[in-house]
Amino acid sequence: MLKAVGHLDADCFYVSAERVRDDFLRGKPVGVLGNQGACVIAKSYEMKAAGVGTGMPIWDALVRCPEGIYVKRDFRWYEVLSRQMLEVVQQWSPRVEYYSIDEFFFAAEPGPDGSFQRLAERIRGAILDRVGVPVTVGIARTRTLAKLISDMAKPFGALAILDRRAEEELLAERPVTEITGIAGRRAARLSPWGILTCLDLAQADRRLVRSLLTATGEALWWELNGEDVRPIQSRRPSHKALSRGGSFGEATHRPTVLYAWLVRNLERLIEELEYHAVAAGRLTVQVIYKDGRSGVGQATLPVPADRFDVLLDVVRPCLRRAWIPRALASHMHLIADNLTARRDTPADLFESPARRARAEAVAQLKREVNARHGRFVLRSAATLPLASIYRDTANEYDICDIRGKICF
């Protein structure tokens, strides 16, 4: 049997998800806004036609599309539909890679009729019938080709191409930058060698491609030539690092507010450490400022840990090193790496058993209260300056919290 890989990508997923629960939005220009409603993070095709782009500030979007309907994002709802889509695809394929919230790769196995084209159409129809979200499905000999095909077939397309001549026609029409993993700088390296289209890359000398784009580029070369060298991962590989953070929405220079964001991000990071049963060996705090500057503080722990009291003592001086007095800060990122499985983490010989037991009891109580009454019902008092953030339920959940995805 011919081996094939499928790629499924939801069409305007966030907007489509909003339309599932509100028919009024269908056929209208719709934009989905980020946490604080400051910018458009997703838009419908109707809004895109009006000139609104992803990441555009809301005030600019309103000028270009004043008749648009703007709604705040709801990642909790988007995950519900995402996992429903995953369940549908798993019914059609023995191996599915949960690549992102709205994107899946899968081992394509046609039915008794042997038609990959009908398989693509059936999966597309099943998702629309059961979930209500329009998707595009591409099937090809490799995942790189499958993604190129689905991108070409959007919106609401279903297309299987497994013939080499048809592949070459597709590759000849598409610039090399349409390959995931090849953007401006990599394309600039290829251009002097006359490699401008996907077909140019596929027909280039493999050793030249490797010298220009390293082993990653060579893997793409094999895939464009029909050799499936990037297997489907039905389980997410272990994390090398975990992070939490992002935009503040409103820039600030106040140390108390920066510290509140640090504690918020730390509590969210600890949730992930506990979920994955790992302890952090090193922590990094990065603060980004509106004037383009950034500050970084980093510390290595003597013993890997996942406890709030221990990690807070570590990140507090990191924030001091990252802080630029009186500068307006707009983003913060808190990163844990050098991860160790919790079962392999040694005890701190310089910590008293009584203090350890008390800290673990407090952490367990916090988990139980929040599991019963709400994710952030019990939290550090240091986060009080962010009361408005906690009042807005849209801030309780973000795309990083959707576990099991391959992509970030």
Image (tube, rainbow, N blue to C red):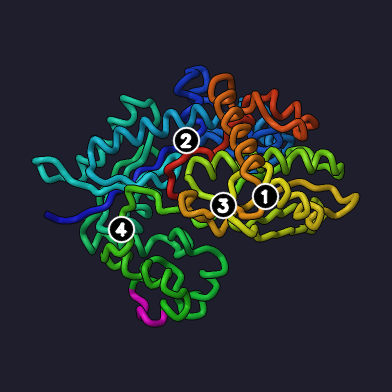
The amino acid type, in three-letter code, at marker 2 is Phe
Whether residue 377 is situated above or below residue 170 in the rendered picture: above
- Nearest to N terminus: mark 3 or mark 1: 1
Q: State the residue in front, 114 or 388.
A: 388
Q: Residue at x 72, y 32 (%)?
A: 380
Can residue 72 be seen here? The reply is no
* Residue annotated with mark 3: 347
Q: Residue at x 39, y 61 (%)?
A: 173
Q: In which quadrant of the rendered view does residue 87 lie?
A: top left
Dots 4, 1 in contact, CB < 8 A: no
Residue sitting at 37 percent across and 55 percent down? Answer: 148
Q: Earlier in the sequence, mark 3 or mark 4?
A: 4
Query: What residue would you read off at disc 4?
Result: 231
Image position of 379 (left or right of 178): right
Categorize mark 4 by other alpha carbons within 10 Å: few (<14), some (14-19), many (20+): few
The answer to whether residue 61 is above or below residue 104 is above
Q: Amino acid at mark 3?
A: Ala
Looking at the image, which residue is at 53% across and 38% down? 401
Residue 184 highlighted magenta (yes or no): no
Nearer mark to the viewer, of 4 and 1: 1
Disc 3 element: loop
* Separation (CA) of disc 4 from disc 2: 25 Å
First in residue order: circle 1 vs circle 2: 2
Left or right, 335 with respect to 383, comes to left
Q: Which residue is mark 1?
A: 333
Question: What residue did someone put label 2 on?
Answer: 13
Q: Marks 3 and 1, Cα distance to the nearest angstrom?
A: 28 Å
Q: Earlier in the sequence, mark 3 or mark 2?
A: 2
Could you say where residue 141 lies in the image, as x and y percent from the top left?
A: 25, 58
- Give the residues in magenta: 203-208
Q: Position of residue 1 (x, y in %)?
A: 11, 54
